[in-house]
Structure formats: structure tokens, C-alpha cells
Image (tube, rainbow, N blue to C red):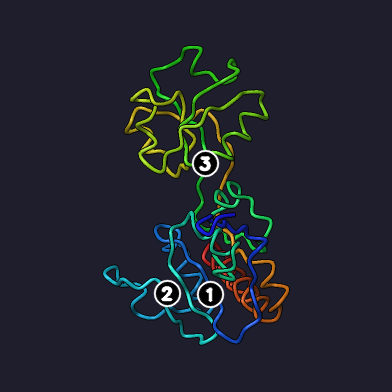
Amino acid sequence: MSENALTVLSPAQTAVPETDSPLILALPKGRILKAAAPLLHRAGIVPGPDFNDEKSRLLRFETNDPNIDVVRVRSFDVATFVAFGGAQIGICGADVLMEFDYPEIYAPLDLGIGGCRISIAQPRDRSGLEDNPNRLSQVRVATKYPSITRRHFAARGINASIVHLHGAMELAPVLDLSHLIVDLVDTGSTLRANGLEETHTIAHVTSRLIVNRTALKTQPERISAIINRFRTALASSAAQARDQQA
């Protein structure tokens, strides 16, 4: 192998050594972070003031707990940070877990936040054969979820040709880049605004608390304590919701 050869690590090749330094909690930017804020507060984890400053260039923040630091990363990267041991704990959408399917990740808690769905959509004005995947052996699909999409269509005997995009998915069928899209849907308003309609829901999605399995084995007391804090926070939230309904 040449000196310039690139070595790519797999999560199984990474190590999470036992240490007295703060544990790292990876949090996703955007709407899930906003939904997670009350839960973090109930769990007694309060990031420093710079955390909520949108102008701040910092990505790692201390918290009120000297044993926990938080990092703020793209939602699609949380699982990778945790799988490779860059963070020991994270909050991650089930869609990301389904897409990457890292065996190094353990997801002990469904946090019940960030609810949405992974759906198939197509233009409203197309009803021909090419837009009915149940009558096809092959279909072209634009998505940021290639693994989920291939598995879904393969289970139905359909070969999905993937157009891998990271955004503006709704443009793909309108511009004849694909027949269908597979994307994360919340209200569906963006689909409707661009002349698309949902035809099938692949999976319903919420956010999960995830941990690195190696970290759980090497630092069981520290990791379990944080899991229990989130479990208690969830129970408190549920109790408050019941009281408000009573």
C-alpha cells in the first residue's frame, strides 16, 4: 500500500476509552433541537449561553454539568458522531438510524419529539404507468435516503434507481429528474406547494436517545446515569401532559 493511500475507518475500528473527561452529547441543529430543549432542561442539562446564540461560531459547549459537554451538528451526522465514538450520546431521528443502521449504536429511549414520516410522493398531475410503482419493475427515485428507498422498493420486487439529493427534493419530478421522491414529511405543505402528493408512508419517525455501545460497556455508570435522567424527564413530561388534560 502506498504512503498516500487513504485509510477509511469503520465504526467497529474506533475505540471509546474510559476517561474522566466530559461525555459528549451530540445534538442536531434545527427543528429537533428546538423540540428537545424542554426535555434537556427537565434532564438537568443546560448548555452555556453561547449555545443559543445563532451568531456563535462555536460547535462544542460546556453545560451546567461538568461531566457533560454538548456539540451541535447536522441532524444527519449525529449517528455518525456517536457510532465512531466522537460523541458517546446523541439525539437522533429514527430516519437517520434506519438509513445508516449502525450496529455500534444502541437506542434505549424514544423521546417522542420531532414527529414526522418518511413518505413517497409524486406529481399530482401524473397518473400514468411510470408513476405507479406497483406496476413497475424499475423506478427512478430522488431521495436523501438511498438505503431506506432501495430496501422499500426491493421488498416489493422493484429496482429503485436512486438520484441522490440533499435538498430541494420536490424539484426532481417537476424537472423530470425522477419519477418519484422519498423524503421526510411533516405537514406536507411543501409537497402541496410544489404540486406533489403523498402516495405511501414508509415509516413514522420520532427522535431517539442514542448511545455508543462501546462507551456503554466501558463507562456503564456514567452513561446509564444520563439515560436515567432522560427517562425521568420523559416521565415528568408525560405526567404534566396528563395533569393538563385532567
Report x, y in % for residue 68.
53, 80
Q: Is residue 98 above or below residue 192?
A: below
Q: Residues within 10 Å of mark 1 (few under 14, many from 20)?
A: many
Q: CA distance from mark 1 to mark 2?
A: 9 Å
Which label number is shown at residue 93?
A: none
The residue sitting at 65% across, 70% down in the picture is 15
Q: Nearer the viewer, residue 169 or 193?
A: 169
The extreme right residue here reads 217
Q: Quadrant of the N terminus?
A: bottom right
Residue at which label 1 appears: 24
Earlier along the polypeptide chain: callout 3 or callout 1? 1
Left or right of 76: which side holds 225?
right
The residue sitting at 46% across, 57% down in the picture is 75
Left or right of 217: which side holds 26?
left
Report x, y in % for residue 35.
45, 62
Q: Is residue 74 above or below residue 188?
A: below
Quadrant of the image occupied by residue 134? top right
Which label number is shown at residue 145?
A: 3
Q: Badges 1 and 2: C-beta atoms under 8 Å apart?
A: yes
Q: Give the secondary structure at mark 3.
A: loop
Earlier along the polypeptide chain: callout 1 or callout 2? 1
Going by the numbered disc 3, the residue's amino acid type is: Tyr
Which label number is shown at residue 60?
A: 2
Earlier along the polypeptide chain: callout 2 or callout 3? 2
Q: Nearer the viewer, residue 221 or 88?
A: 88
Q: Give the secondary structure at mark 2.
A: strand
Going by the numbered disc 2, the residue's amino acid type is: Arg
Q: Quadrant of the C terminus?
A: bottom right
Q: Residues within 10 Å of mark 2 (few under 14, many from 20)?
A: some
Q: Nearer the viewer, residue 180 or 202?
A: 180
Q: Is residue 164 above or below residue 228?
A: above
